[in-house]
Amino acid sequence: MIDRANCIRITLMANPHSHVSILFGQTYSALAQLNSRMAEPGTESLERRKVILDVDTGIDDAHAIMLALSRADIDVVAITCSNGNVKIDDVTSNTLRVLHACDRLEVPVYKGAARSLLGQVSKFDNFTGPAWTTPVDLKMVQSEQAANALVRLAREHPGKITLVALAPLTNIAMAVNLDPAFPSNLLDVFIMGGNTAAQGRVSLCAEFNFHGDPEAAFIALNSLHNIRLLPYELCCEHLLSWVRHFPAVVVSLLLLLFSW
Ligand SMILES: [Ca+2]
């Protein structure tokens, strides 16, 4: 999750969206089994890394959530949602759908920014198909706003939280502005965003997450410490860590085939 897996953009479910929720659950189970087998002996008792995922859940962030949840050495303490890939209500619902498919609804989900700092709202509708439109229990969403939760959790666990930012950085910038101590309360930060070769995705030169809220990206990059930036080019170069995850993907596909 923390390295290449952040950048995985699995394109398995090109069309059969009706199967996506089942595939999520089976992929998660297979990943969990694989990761448990790959865990080094004697590491079971080690302290698990506390991680907050800031997401704008579409397909790629759904996989990032699954990968993080499947790791025995990672404790996902919260998932904060931001406007981005789709609008905030869909992001929040999609995140709950992924957690439901993985049977991990105990992970708290916080709804966050509905628009960028300067008012930009996602232009994209939610994905089509039953897996993306099935009802969710919105009572599972925490009442606390995402930025407030980020500030609070960082204060409660000073120097312990790894923040993994996979969306436009609006929630993060809001947390920085709410509490100047927020950056120093984090252990480290992984940001999927930006580019290094000026090859854009949503415009001639812009990468999606930074394009979605450039002012927030400015605040985050100028305020946070211990940042590891995972730019667009890295995502393109490492579409899938096949050596590590191919067996899990094959298992999930086989399960999928034999379940019909
Ligand atoms: Ca994302």
Image: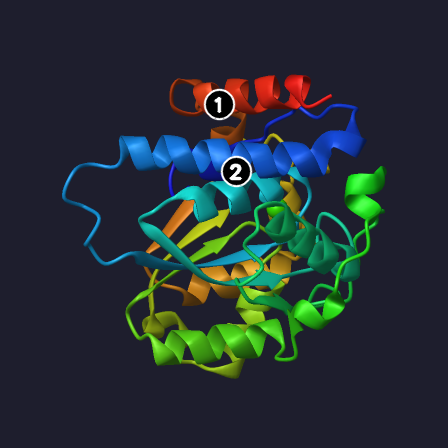
Residue 114 falls in image quadrant: bottom right
Q: How dense is the environment of label 1, judged by Cα within 10 Å: few (below 14), some, or many (20 and up)?
A: few
Q: Nearer the viewer, residue 1 or 141?
A: 141
Q: Please say if 64 is above or below 76.
A: above
Quadrant in which the N terminus is drawn: top left
Q: Nearer the viewer, residue 35 or 254?
A: 254
Q: CA distance from mark 2 to mark 1?
A: 24 Å
**What's the residue type where badge 2 is placed?**
Tyr
- Residue 194 shown left or right of residue 200 in the figure: left
Which residue in the structure is indicated by mark 1? 237
Name the residue: 55% across, 79% down: 148
Q: Relative to 209, is 203 on the left or the right?
A: right
Q: How far across and down, in percent of the image, does residue 131 sit?
A: 77, 41
Residue 8 visible in rendering: yes
Identify residue type, mark 1.
Glu
User: Where residue 219 appears, x then y in whole percent?
Assistant: 52, 66
- Of the numbered discs in the image, which one, if any, rests on residue 28? 2
Q: Nearer the viewer, residue 195 or 168?
A: 168
* Local secondary structure at mark 2: helix
For the residues labelled 2 and 1, say whether their Cβ atoms are less than 8 Å apart: no
Camera-near label (2 vs 1) is: 2
Looking at the image, which residue is at 29% across and 56% down? 48
Q: Quadrant of residue 188?
A: bottom left
* Element on which disc 1 rests: helix
Residue 99 lies, in percent from the top left, at 60, 52
Is 31 located above or below residue 229 in the figure?
Answer: above
Closer to the chain start, of discs 2 and 1, is 2
Q: Residue at x 63, y 77 (%)?
A: 145
